[in-house]
Amino acid sequence: MDVTRLHYNEQGLIPAIVQQHDTGEVLMMAWMTLSTVRETIASGETVFWSRSRGERWHKGATSGNTQKVVSLRADCDADVLLLQVDQQGSGACHTGARSCFYTAVEPDV
Amino acid sequence: MDVTRLHYNEQGLIPAIVQQHDTGEVLMMAWMTLSTVRETIASGETVFWSRSRGERWHKGATSGNTQKVVSLRADCDADVLLLQVDQQGSGACHTGARSCFYTAVEPDV
């Protein structure tokens, strides 16, 4: 599927799930635009759109924790991306953790 | 983390990544509300919010392709969920595929 045929939301964004290609660990989820999807493919490293900063975000550009893209797939509705990567450096999370998903969710009742 | 402290978006929704617990395969991504997160925890099966139909959606209720929840975690920003499940039946995708992520994305240049 061509990148222009992906379904971006009303803000021009598509969710991108990032998974370590060999272990299967889900590292993070962030958002991409058409432009950063193209840049991700062209560069072979993940480039997202930071919603909080309102700017392009080349993951690991300053920390060295880049993500080398192994595969890029869309889901059946073409509105979610799954990137299998090789995570470089210490990890994907800004906290220093390998994965962002380290917090157990508990019932409130 | 308590389910009420998760960050739901302006529509009251939070993305939920669903992963087969033992193989690591990412099966799908869908959306939950506070109410369906609670129902997922209480029932032990995934319950989403269908944005297209505007209604609660107990995954597999009619097809038998339910998802037994093994773990539920939030990311570091508490605005994305990762559910590890045991997928029942033939698969997660409405097309009959095991995973929704079977479409390769290609550059357009």
Image: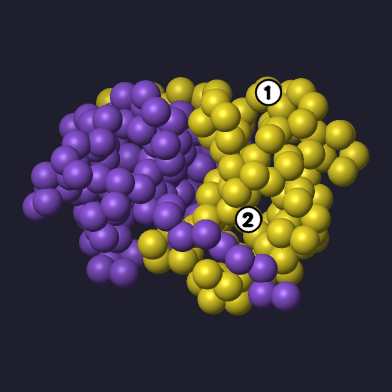
Chain colours: A yellow, B purple
Identify the residue at horizontal 58%, vertical 53% (top origin).
Answer: A72
Q: Which structural element holds mark 2? A: strand
The residue identified by callout 2 is A31
Quadrant for residue B18, please give it. Answer: top left
Relative to B58, is A56 on the left or the right? right
Seen from the viewer's position, the closer of residues B93 and A94 is B93
Q: Looking at the picture, which amino acid does disc 2 mark?
A: Trp
Q: Which mark is residue A97?
A: 1
Quadrant for residue A3, please give it. Answer: bottom right
Viewer can see residue A62: yes
Q: Chain of mark 2?
A: A
Residue B43 image offset from top left, x and y in percent? 18, 32
Q: Residues within 10 Å of mark 1 (few under 14, many from 20)?
A: some
Quadrant for residue B85, please give it. Answer: top left
Identify the residue at horizontal 26%, vertical 60% (top origin).
Answer: B95
Residue B3 image offset from top left, x and y in percent? 40, 34
Lower position in the chain sequence, tag 1 or tag 2: 2
Q: Which structural element holds mark 1? A: loop
Compared with residue B96, is residue A66 higher up or lower down, i.e. above or below? Answer: above
Which quarter shows the C terminus of chain B? bottom right
Identify the residue at horizontal 46%, vertical 66% (top origin).
Answer: A78
Viewer can see residue B71: no
Residue B47 image offset from top left, x and y in percent? 25, 45
Task: Confirm whether circles 1 and 2 share one chain.
Answer: yes
Seen from the viewer's position, the closer of residues B32 and B34 is B32
Compared with residue A82, is residue A7 higher up or lower down, i.e. above or below? Answer: below
Residue B5 image offset from top left, x and y in percent? 48, 35
Relative to B70, is A82 on the left or the right? right
Q: Looking at the picture, which amino acid does disc 1 mark?
A: Ala
Relative to A30, is B1 on the left or the right? left
Q: Which mark is residue B82?
A: none
